[in-house]
Amino acid sequence: MEVESFESEEVAKLLNDWFVSIKVDREERPDVDKVYMTYVQALYGSGGWPLSVFLSPDLKPLMGGTYFPPDDNYGRPGFKTVLRKVKDAWGSKRDALIKSGSFAIEQLSKALSARASSNNLPSGLPQDALNLCAEQLSQSYDPKFGGFGSAPKFPRPVEIQLMLYHSKKLEETGKLGESNKGRKMVFFSLQCMARGGIHDHIGGGFHRYSVDEWWHVPHFEKMLYDQGQLADVFLDAFSITKDVFYSFVARDILDYLRRDMIGPEGEIFSAEDADSAESPGAIRKKEGAFYVWTSKEIDDILGEHANLFKEHYYIKPSGNCDLSRLSDPHNEFSGKNVLIEKNDSSALASKLGIPIEKYLEILGECRQKLFDVRSHRPRPHLDDKVIVSWNGLVISSFARASKILKDEVEGTKLYFPVTGCDPKEYIAVAEKAASFIRRKLYDERLCRLQHSFRKGPSKAPGFLDDYAFLISGLLDLYEFGGGIFWLVWALELQNTQDELFLDKEGGGYFNTPGEDPSVLLRVKEDHDGAEPSGNSVSAINLVRLASMVAGSKSDHYRQNAGHLLAVFETRLKDMATAVPLMCCAADMLSVPSRRQVVLVGHKPSAEFENMLAAAHSTYDPNRTVIHIDPNDAEEMEFWEETNSNIALMAKNNSSPDSVVALVCQNFTCSPPVVDPKSLETLLSQKPSSSA
């Protein structure tokens, strides 16, 4: 529609004569977008973008829809016809239109501010919802190409998180066969995504989705929220398998972000467009132009290694977008190639009679040469908005990588586009991004966030997702080695979130503060889609915070989490696959006692870093890591006030020569250990589940 209608002089005249046109950036104002998207979905049963909605002067919706062709076609009215009909209806049926718009908003408002009938979910429902979601996802699993569901294929990381969480629970109850079956689905899906064209093999990171079942031809846009969540699930896969295939992909994503998506003050930008000019100076842009290659280009750039590279990435003179009838139905990529790994590297190296290390080295050198050439092409537009919620997701993945990747075997060889930094550099990226948000988008007096930044803070306030995702990122930043400052800020933000968004009577969180009268609906969002819902993330945050603080504050967090989940009881019962992360949250809350790992010692020191890496060496979503330096007066004071048991542990286990670790559960702690291997052994034991 951008090209067909919004660049048309004829359409412009109709719009300017009869309407006031308002363009909404849905990333800048998700609250405004949500109101009118919900209206269109309720009216027509489906929604999507582009979204066109016609409003009365008091902003009530009168009519709407998604894509309209410029002229009547495809059995649907053209945009010009729609404009004329709305204008005529406004002249002849104005009162009826306004009345129906007001009624629709009233009905939606009632439906979308669901209230809990009790303060907790019924006993057994969390486990039932978790099992149901895993079962339904397993039924939609694609055993040939990986992933859950059919084309177009979106990398929906919340599904991967659910399957890994469920498999862990099965393993803990001794159901190893079922557990391995779920994990195999996840690992194969991650491998297919990483080998497909949805993954940018030359520059790192992932595109938005693939149009075909092979994960091959993508919509070439790159979104920050995908990078953060995908890095996390590849880190999870590595922590379970210790297979560097997964750690390489996690690094590849994070190194792409470091190179291309981070501003001078550590802020992390939101997206790169799909389209770009095919040559310098060209006016028209084309989808994927920056990323695709002809066979001749590969020959010219790579010379003697061209054939090896072409076989590895399925490159053909006629173009390779032929794997599926869905890949390129309009022949847009005729003669072009989107890199995809269809064959096993070891088999190809063996076929050529060269060692696998040498083969991978050659591929890395080839990718570097192509990257250098590609960097001279016109780049896709960089959306340099800084969105708090998306930064929160990525702060989390950088912080987690700093310790999880310490488990890579020493001397592991890395290949371009992975740069091969020391993992501890990643936590510095996370801290710099969090510091930017604190400085530029946080009012310390009011304890409130702004939603986004571009050449200054936006007028939009922070929304639920901004608070929830940032709190989650700050908790990871603290647990994976950041200072106590980040945990203090997370607690402060949780207080503000409760004040602005919590429905104290009905339970759960609204998506907006409700202070802007022009935003007609306050919604309690639950759908875990391309991004998780603010309510799902908040429920997990509350469980995590409850395991750090003590007494009435801990009880308060758990009660809020229980009340929140009760709001979505029907959804968990009937449509578990719509809320995979909420299923995990419900189970986390039902776990009788979370495992706590408490580290006591001088920081920063190599010993402390190694013990912290050991504390995070196994995959366990039901674990909290707390670290405390008994010689740090600020830390001791914080824990004395927040959880005196932790302060007491620090006093009783202080050692000038070592870092002491205790693993606690059900109000009892293991004997202290002072070396990483002993801690890893302790953590590999099956957790106790008695109340």
Image (cartoon, grey):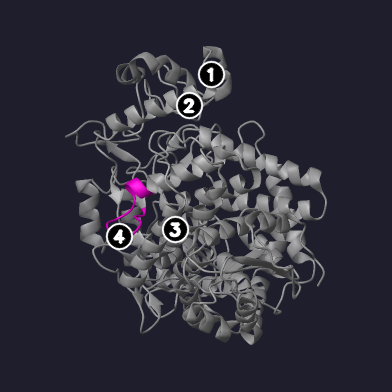
Of marks 4 and 2, which one's residue comes earlier in the chain? Answer: 4
Residue 427 numbered mark, or none: 3
* Residue that appears at 40% across and 58% down: 428
Question: Reading the chain from its start, which is encountered first: label 3 or label 2?
Answer: 2
Whether pointer 2 and pointer 1 mark residues with C-beta atoms closer than 8 Å, the reply is yes
Q: In the structure shown, which secondary structural element does the residue marked by tag 2 occupy?
A: helix
User: Which of the marked residues, 3 or 4, is nearer the chain's N terminus?
Assistant: 4
Is 310 positioned to the left or the right of 140 in the image? left
Q: Position of residue 237 (x, y in %)?
A: 61, 46
Q: Which residue is mark 4?
A: 23
Q: Amino acid at mark 3?
A: Ile
Q: What residue type is disc 4 on?
A: Lys
Q: Are marks 3 and 1 in contact (CB under 8 Å)?
A: no
The residue that disc 1 covers is: 349
Pointer 4 with pointer 2, Cβ within 8 A: no
What segment carries the magenta color? 258-270
Residue farthest toward the front in the current orientation of the protein: 657
Q: Which label's residue is closer to the chain start, 3 or 1?
A: 1
What type is the residue that disc 2 sits on?
A: Leu
Main SS type for the magenta part?
Answer: loop
Numbered disc 1: secondary structure: helix
Write down the residue under mark 2.
360
Q: Is residue 477 left or right of residue 589?
A: left
Q: Quadrant of residue 213?
A: top right
Query: Is residue 483 placed above or below 261 in the rendered structure?
Result: below
